[in-house]
Image: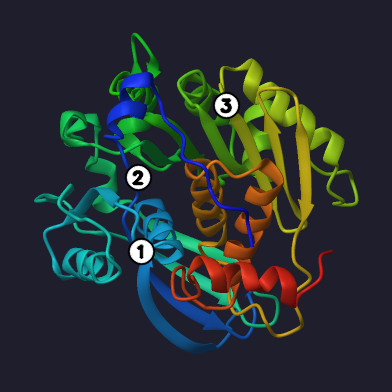
């Protein structure tokens, strides 16, 4: 178990009053329509769907629920937009049922709730996404009541999948950068996450936000896209020294506190003092992994919890890897998440790669 957390504060006044608590998690609210398949077809070919299901997805669902499951006493707010429809009501019901505060979720009149068809190969656990942007495309900075937030942390994502936040801003570069700067101005600790996409938009869309990020939590594909530094060699093997260089490039672009990168093999953490930490992923037994959707958000929830409670970098990576492993035990993005003690139990149960 991690040692007793020590609380962190933003200022002497906050330390005296202990005003800000918990997390505001802003971004994508999605219904995941899950299909388990017995393979992945070539174009024009057929495979069988063996099971179907539905659950919430997107950062503002997954990371928010992950934090509440780790510690039900934490104030966690979800911020975003759904459609004015049944799927939007479904999202709010699931979030509120898990203890997440939904009063900052708005209903969009002109577009339905965003959804993703999540196609998961039962043989490998790999997933492919077919996404409809829907109401998420209408979520913008004007929809966030920054004065009404009283949280210690503000976490937003996914960059590259929030059209209004990805839009250019004459002063800050992008609207997401403006949002992060605004949150900092209100005394919140900021962080962001990015979606993995093909194409060359990473540097243009993501880089302006980094100077207003206290922390960034992304995967190796996203880190490579932002930095232009290969995370793997030609055989596909992860390159830890390259991961460190990617993290260093994120600091050079403006990140202030911590750069955290995760991949299937390990978690990596570079702090602003130059300390670089690596914790291998858990060596899970065959058949344990039921799906990988939401694993990155679960890792982020563990990382944010560690930052909030002043854990060491290595403790944070251990917790984040265990949270991701919990997620992998379920086909959807939230059902596998557990409380802190049960999550950390995985570190004793399984070895590491």
Q: Secondary structure at mark 1?
A: loop
What mark, if any, has residue 244 been given in the picture?
none
What mark, if any, has residue 257 been given in the picture?
3
**Marks 2 and 3, how far apart at CA:** 17 Å
Mark 1 in CB contact with mark 2 (< 8 angstroms)? no
Mark 3 in CB contact with mark 1 (< 8 angstroms)? no
* Residue 185 coordinates in the image, percent (x, y): 31, 18
Q: Secondary structure at mark 3?
A: loop
| Neighbours of disc 1 within 10 Å: few (<14), some (14-19), many (20+) | some
Q: Nearer the viewer, mark 3 or mark 1?
A: 1
Q: Is residue 241 visible?
A: yes
Q: Is residue 264 above or below residue 139?
A: below
* Residue 297 coordinates in the image, percent (x, y): 50, 55
**Marks 1 and 2, how far apart at CA:** 12 Å
- Which residue is at a point 63% across and 33% down the rendered structure image? 259
Q: Is residue 101 above or below residue 165?
A: below
């Amino acid at each position: 178990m991690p040692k007793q957390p020590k609380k962190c504060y933003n200022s002497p006044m906050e330390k005296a009053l202990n005003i800000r608590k918990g997390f505001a998690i802003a971004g994508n609210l999605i219904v995941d329509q899950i299909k388990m398949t017995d393979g992945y077809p070539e174009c024009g070919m057929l495979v069988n769907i063996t099971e179907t299901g539905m659950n919430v997805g997107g950062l503002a669902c997954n990371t928010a629920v992950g934090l509440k499951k780790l510690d039900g006493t934490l104030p966690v707010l979800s911020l975003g937009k759904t459609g004015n429809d049944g799927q939007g009501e479904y999202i709010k019901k699931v979030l509120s049922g898990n203890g997440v505060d939904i009063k900052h979720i708005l209903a969009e009149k002109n577009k339905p709730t965003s959804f993703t068809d999540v196609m998961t190969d039962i043989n490998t656990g790999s997933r492919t996404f077919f996404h409809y942007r829907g109401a998420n495309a209408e979520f913008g900075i004007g929809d966030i009541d920054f004065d009404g937030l009283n949280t210690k942390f503000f976490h937003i994502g996914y960059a590259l999948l929030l059209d209004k936040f990805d839009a250019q801003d004459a002063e800050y570069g992008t609207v997401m950068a403006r949002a992060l700067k605004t949150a900092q101005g209100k005394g919140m600790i900021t962080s962001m996450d990015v979606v993995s996409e093909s194409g060359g938009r990473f540097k243009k869309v993501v880089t302006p936000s980094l100077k207003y990020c206290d922390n960034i939590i992304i995967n190796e594909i996203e880190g490579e896209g932002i930095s232009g530094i290969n995370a793997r060699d030609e055989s596909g093997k992860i390159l830890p020294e390259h991961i460190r260089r990617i993290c260093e490039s994120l600091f050079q672009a403006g990140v202030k506190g911590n750069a955290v990168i995760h991949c299937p093999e390990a978690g990596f953490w570079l702090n602003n003092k130059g300390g670089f930490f690596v914790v291998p992923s858990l060596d899970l037994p065959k058949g344990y992994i039921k799906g990988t959707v939401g694993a990155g958000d679960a890792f982020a929830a563990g990382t944010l919890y560690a930052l909030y409670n002043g854990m060491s970098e290595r403790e944070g990576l251990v917790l984040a890897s265990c949270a991701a492993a919990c997620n992998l035990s379920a086909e959807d993005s939230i059902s596998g998440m557990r409380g802190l003690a049960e999550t950390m139990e995985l570190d004793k149960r399984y070895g590491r790669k």
